[in-house]
Image: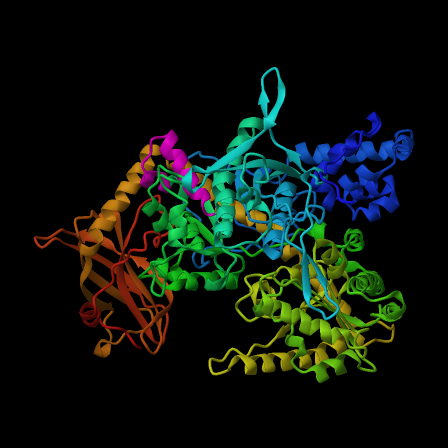
Amino acid sequence: MKAIRRFSVRPVLPEPLRPLHRLARNLRWSWHPETRELFEAVDPERWRASGGDPVRLLSSVPVARLAELAADHGFLRRLGAVAEDLDDYLTGPRWYQGRTAAAPDRVNRSDDAARSDGAVPAGDGVRSDDAVPGRTDGGAGPEGSPALPAAIAYFSPEFGITAALPQYSGGLGILAGDHLKAASDLGVPLIGVGLLYRHGYFRQSLSREGWQQEQYPVLDPNELPLTLLHEHHPGAGMGRPARVTLTLPGGRPLHAQIWQAQVGRVPLLLLDSDVEGNGPGERDVTDRLYGGGSEHRLLQEMLLGIGGVRAVRAYCRLTGHTAPEVFHTNEGHAGFLGLERIRELMDTAGADFDAAHETVRAGTVFTTHTPVPAGIDRFDRELVARHFGDDGELPGIGVERTLALGRETYPGGDPGVFNMAVMGLRLAQRANGVSTLHGQVSREMFAGLWPGFDADEVPITSVTNGVHAPTWRAPEVTRLGARQFGHLPAGELWELRRTLRKQLVAEVRQRLYASWRQRGAGTAELGWIDSVLDPDVLTIGFARRVPSYKRLTLMLRDRDRLTELLLHPKRPVQIVVAGKAHPADDGGKRLVQELVRFADDARVRHRLVFLPDYGMGMAQKLYPGCDVWLNNPLRPLEACGTSGMKAALNGCLNLSVLDGWWDEWYEPDFGWAIPTADGSAVDEDRRDDLEATALYELLENRVAPQFYDRGPDGLPGHWIDMVRQTLTTLAPKVLAGRMVREYVERLYAPAARAHRALDPATSGELSAWKTRVRAAWPQVAVDHVETRITPPAPGGAAELGSALSLRVEVRLGGLDPADVEVQAVAGRVDESDHLTDTAHIPLKPTAGPDDQGRHLYEGPLALDRTGPFGYTVRILPTHPLLASPAELGLTALPSESTSEAAGVLMR
């Protein structure tokens, strides 16, 4: 029979065991080995049955066992030590608290900053950011202003903290979880904001034919490591659950309650619409992650952005937490948060829309993870219009104001859609991609929002993702790491790798058996699973989401050749594959089925396996146990690709296309680069054939021979050297601690300073200045350019070491010279006279305006390089509170006739 109602009965722990409740509710246990070991000691068998979830464990332990533990002095001593350690972790000063009020120093990208104690050792490897394209650091702010924000709100549609809180689908959520954990370790005062999905993403299984099937188990928040936020009434204690409310078309309310997960020092607020008072449709807004149609998705994103800001305000009011100065939106899904903050300022400070917009932009950071326009959320303009304005949300903001923020105004844009990433960029003064290459791709993709500027001047910088070492590094690796991998004997390092491989083999057999049972196989036909994989065979891992660009089945392009590699008599290869296709992506499901059917073949099934239901629990076993991590996306469509980083933390070598982070940090000591067939004349089939052939040749001629090439001591010396280099040189670069420090120093701190500089009066003055500049700009022009070479050379030619004196006459359309900067832009020129490798030289005003309204600017241009060289002149708006010269998207360049008069130097 089926229950008509479900509810949870919480255990009552004996008084000496009460600290277990707090330890279970703080998700630090998910990356703190001593806490996990303590819970395992409560009841090892039930710990395994609970999937390593302390909340589930405590709800299942018999009363007699609890009484026994309450009298066990040894256990109580361990419990006291772990509880005291958590107290120290939560209250002691960390890296963030040790920062001074001075301007931040440059960021060390190569130290071991993700140690769980948050300490930052000294070291070199400091990266200079002075020449980073699109850098948007902002100014130092008012004299004496603190350098760091008092608090930061971090919004994301998904968070991968632990398998016990399944609120993630893939890399975006795992990154968000690692961001929160590293912020906690470093003491960064972050508040996470997301949605609580009652069905999570989905659980994946396979049919007998290998077709992906989805299940959506119901998640009871009371059985998760969550606490419901309540109102407080003086003298009456806890009141009703705290709620936020949005207004839907027709005046319908959308209520959401606020659950809190505690991620170390960081609170994570999750909004839940499955509450009384909502209609059936509204209750389902937070039913599934990335489910439903366009309107369902729009409502989720409105609740995340607008409701999320209201949830933060409620949390700070009820707990006394410091209000955030900086708001960080992780992808465009939470972009509406900027509109809600504009509404707040209009209602509370009496600001007009433009002034409020300036204040909000100054304190907002936007991170894009999408390297292709098709990956961005875009809604029909009419759908958005129905949900805003007088009959919906944010009635004080005109619908046209809202729609303008998401309008695709660039060439090729669709005027009928509302683009969430475009809105995110317009509502944030600082933006970044998630690897150096992705930053470049993003600048090119969004360049149309800054007309008149080259892509490398678009104000989008990059902060390369990182991963949280205590979460993703195997305990065996962590323990040995204390002895310094650089000095660990080769035999011990090799034995470590074999131990991890052996653990993976056991894990794979167990999961494969469970999968085949789900597919309908009987026990009698599964004896072959006992011989699946071999702990002494070169093991390759491939696990990720299954969109087409990640090319799950590239390895199958030549099945005969793959089979030869798998079954090689002396140098065999074995491959473990996992991945989920989106439920609505039948193309992705066909790729999964194609791979599964190959893996089902009796000839190779002991060498190649597909494991369904890829998630954090599986990943934490998979990364350490593999020798090689394979990644073969279409370049440059992998924004970062952090799975290879997690593998590297465990001494796994990378075999990847030069995309995302691998393009940035690849060295032959760390693995191999798969060549790409990126010529414009290569069609898709030919490209995949060429790159698959390159993959097979690398495996056959370089990877496998290096693994099996043993010296007199029986060890693969070259391979072990690569493992050692990966652990000592690459692993410290890929840490989430490094990533979060970069966000703090390059984005959060400048955003806080810029936000503080914009009081209501100043923001009003800045918005009025922008309005005045935009109105005058059509009349701003470069009228005339004169040049003279000094010292003069025979025939007027330019020689290395000489200088070009520039005299430029400009019209400012009524603007003051203080409103603009006149620049010479000089650099190399290609065959079409396009400037590259440019320098920007400000020219000084020397006279004007004359009787025709022209101003004269002058300055020297040093000719410090040989070869084809050219220059142009441009006028830009300038203001002390602009974070980038391109911020307004305005520039004035010489007309074609003016350029001809100026000439181009070609010597």
Residue 640: x and y in percent read 57, 61
Confirm whether the magenta stretch covers residue 340.
yes
Q: Quadrant of residue 623?
A: bottom right
Q: Is residue 387 above or below residue 325?
A: below
- Looking at the image, which residue is at 36% across and 50% down? 403
Q: Is residue 133 above or below residue 69?
A: below
Residue 664: x and y in percent read 56, 64
Chief SS of the magenta region: helix
Q: Quadrant of residue 588?
A: bottom right
Q: Is residue 270 above or below residue 559?
A: above
- Looking at the image, which residue is at 39% across and 58% down? 458
Q: Is residue 142 visible?
A: no
- Looking at the image, which residue is at 39% across and 29% down? 348
Q: Is residue 338 above or below residue 806?
A: above
Residue 423: x and y in percent read 41, 51
Left/right placement of residue 13 relative to residue 619 reads right
Left/right placement of residue 673 relative to residue 356 reads right
Confirm whether the magenta stretch covers residue 104.
no
Residue segment shown in magenta:
335-358
Q: Nearer the viewer, residue 477 or 381?
A: 381
Which residue is situated farthest in the left direction here? 851
Q: Nearer the viewer, residue 836 or 363?
A: 363
Left/right placement of residue 714 relative to residue 580 reads right
Q: Is residue 46 visible?
A: yes
Q: Quadrant of the C terminus?
A: bottom left
Q: Quadrant of the N terminus?
A: top right
Q: Nearer the viewer, residue 816 or 193?
A: 193
